[in-house]
Amino acid sequence: MEQDLISKKELLELTGISYGQLYRWKRKNLIPEEWFIRKSTFTGQETFFPKEKILARIHQIKNMKEDLSLDELADMFSPNPSEIAVRYKDVVERNIVSKIALDLYQEGRGDIKEFPFENLLYVYVLDAALQSGEISLDEGKILLQTLEEHYAKFQHRNCELMLIRKLGIATCLLVSTPNEVHVERGARVVVRLHMPTYVEQLKMKLA
Amino acid sequence: MEHKARHDLSLSGVGSASGGTYHDVRINGVGKVHGDLECVHCRVDGVADIYGNVKATTVQIRGRARVQGSVSGDEVRLEGDTTIDGNCEAETFHAAGAFRVDGLVNADQVSIRLHGSAKVKEIGGEHIRVVKHHKFGLFSRFKKLTAETIEGDDVHLEFTKADVVRGNRVTIGPGCEIECVEYRTDFQQAPEARVTESRKL
């Protein structure tokens, strides 16, 4: 998976931030370590970043740093789930996840009054997968089951949720990232969801 | 941070301790710490081997220390002979003495006074200033900072050997050997400095 890279120089030029700011944000963990990609160029060592991700992140930081302190921002961007729990009523009212995903989650679980962050995250990821139009409701169930059983084991390290389908039979797996996955011919990776991205999105929605 | 329940750790003479969370950490004799240290003030006046990371509000090393991990704090002062295997992150980083950091020194204010040989892989921050205290002397030629890359908004260097220096305002003083300087607004070079290539961005 070759992604578009941007050099540090170009990044500073494009966004108008200074070295001081960039290093400060790195120090506060607003920019994850793995985005700093070192490469040798003819002008010596240079640092590159995944272009889309870093531009989006810097845009977010610039927008929010008026209202939040750097430490608060760091919490928001960290892959660690927040402590909060959200009431069922709020989830519905604020339209955080779709009704379909919510119903699927509630199936067999009875009435849920409150969602701890992690559970809401599962529903949120399920929703994203369903919205992509790639998976069926039944596949949604195994996705949810995988998350519930195994997500905690990653202890907030970066991981990806994958659904692979061959001849109409789907298998769901949770793998740590960064890595490469190759599947046999005839099988297809249907969805591949980067969990930290969703943790972050959900935090933004709840904030 | 909750400070009340924390104890102090003091190692005088020869001693060792496990890592952990403390209020003040002082190592006066020969001390070993097996594990990560988290404290408010960390001060080493003797010889310390720390097998883990150090996280403290202020870190002051006046003796000899080897940290087999990273150091982070608001204020880090290295005044003795320090080796850090990982990165060193701080709001202000002061060094006056010999030191080696195998990773990145990342601080808003980096000020280095050369009293011995200093080696860092990378330096990044807002203001970076490297000066030599006594320009002449018996061992003067060993007093040098060696780095791969140095990046900052304001960079002032003396007696530094580096592959790449990037910054907005860059001043290369006497005794420097720099392969490549990339600057945005301002570049000055002392006649005694050697810069192979300089480029305005």
Image (cartoon, coloured by chain):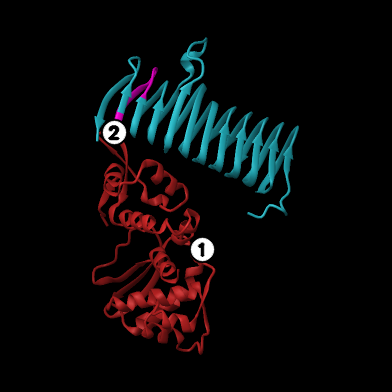
Q: Is residue B125 above or below residue A202?
A: above
- How far, Cα to Cα, is label 2 from label 1? 46 Å
Q: Position of residue B132 (x, y in %)?
A: 48, 20
In the rendered structure, find residue B185 and report the number of the disc placed on it.
Answer: 2
Q: Secondary structure at mark 1?
A: loop
Q: Secondary structure at mark 2?
A: strand
Q: Amino acid at mark 1?
A: Gln
Query: Magenta part mainly helix, strand or loop?
Result: strand
Q: Nearer the viewer, residue B77 or B69?
A: B77
Label the red chain with its letter.
Answer: A
Residue A62 visible in the displayed image: yes
Is residue B92 shown left or right of residue A177?
Answer: right
Q: Is residue A89 above or below residue A30?
A: below
Q: For the magenta stretch, what is the residue range?
A: B172-186
Q: Position of residue B168 (x, y in %)?
A: 33, 35
Chain B in the picture: what colour? cyan
Question: Residue tagged by mark 1?
Answer: A155
Is residue A122 shown left or right of residue A54?
Answer: right
Q: Is residue B88 above or below residue A195?
A: above
Looking at the image, the residue that sits furthest to the front is: A66
